[in-house]
Image (tube, rainbow, N blue to C red):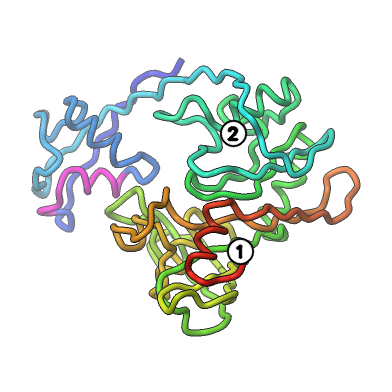
Amino acid sequence: MSENRCTEFLVGEGDAGMRLDQFLSGRLPDVSRSYLQRQIKDGGVLVDGRAAKAGNKLKPGSAVAITITPPRELEILPQDIPLDILYEDEDIIVLNKPKQMVVHPAPGHDSGTIVNALLYHCRDSLSGINGVMRPGIVHRIDQDTTGAIVACKNDHSHRFIAAQLKEHSITRTYHAIVHNHVKEMEGTIKSTLGRHPVDRKKMAMDVKNGKPAITHYRVLDYLNHRYTYVSCHLETGRTHQIRVHMASLGNPILGDAVYGPSKCPFHLQGQTLHAKTLGFIHPSTKKYIEFDAPLPDYFQKLLARLGGTS
């Protein structure tokens, strides 16, 4: 079992006046800000040997010490949860993920996930490359995003499809409803994308250590003079890529309170974003296969209400 790890940082001249939580977020980019704030609150962070508050302003030369506690290992149990299966064979299973369903367990979501359902449905037939927390999972989509996702039943299939993801050769097309009219009928957004330097729950364009991100978009329909129905084809697959890229055009996704308006005129559960098409080379047949996930009912009803076509 891992032991607690104590890490110490020295405050430089350029960090003078910075909040303690912001300073630690910059030094520990892989640690969530909520975890850092909890550690500060619980006395796990010391400034010059004394407990401090998250909002304390730092002085040059001060020593900031934080104790990193290893995460508690979750027990992942099989659950008999209905799955919308688009395709299944001995190597892979392609699912149409519903809204509000998390792909794999994490603190706060240790049950009711795609993984819990797969463990029940597939029994012991899931790849183990991503460990006990994410068996079979090659890629993920956000909790409030619906649509096609593939899981692998053995390590060979996992490696084969993961290689295609790395090469950006997998077909991934999303449908979304965005605010305002998209000016150009089609276009490409290129940027780097990485963790927001201040708000660790968000992603941002053109940040330090960001990775290349490319989205091709196309207008499918203009809706009700206020919204646009678009198709977004991913050339790369970074976290929140479509959400950030469309917001950068002034067209945030409808229902996305993180990158768009905080209030939504419709009763929605998160962003109207659906992984419509997923295509890749099959790990055994070596032939290209493609799957189409039908739009969820709420999405179709919203299109009809706004005067669009589904």
- Residue 270 x %, y %: 42, 51
- Residue 106 x %, y %: 46, 31
Instruction: Note whether residue 231 is visible.
Output: yes
Q: Are marks 2 and 1 in contact (CB under 8 Å)?
A: no
Q: Amino acid at mark 2?
A: Ile
Residue at 52% x, 50% y is: 145
Q: Residues within 10 Å of mark 2 (few under 14, many from 20)?
A: many
Residue at 10% x, 53% y is: 17
Q: Give the dominant element type of the magenta stretch: helix, strand or loop.
A: helix
| Residue 300 belongs to the span the image colors magenta | no
In the picture, the disc for residue 310 is none
| Residue 17 belongs to the span the image colors magenta | yes
Mark 2–mark 1 Cα distance, whole angstroms, equals 23 Å
In the picture, the disc for residue 114 is 2
Q: Which residues are magenta?
A: 16-27
Establish if 274 lies above or below 70.
below
Kindly state the secondary structure of the residue where label 1 is placed: strand
- Residue 177 x %, y %: 49, 65
Q: Nearer the viewer, mark 2 or mark 1?
A: 2
Q: Quadrant of residue 167?
A: bottom right
Establish if 14 lies above or below 220.
above
- Residue 263 x %, y %: 29, 58
Q: Residues within 10 Å of mark 1 (few under 14, many from 20)?
A: many
Q: In this figure, which residue is indicated by the disc labeled 1?
A: 234
* Closer to us: 18 or 249: 249
* Closer to us: 302 or 160: 302
Q: Quadrant of the C terminus?
A: bottom right
Q: Is residue 57 left or right of residue 115?
A: left
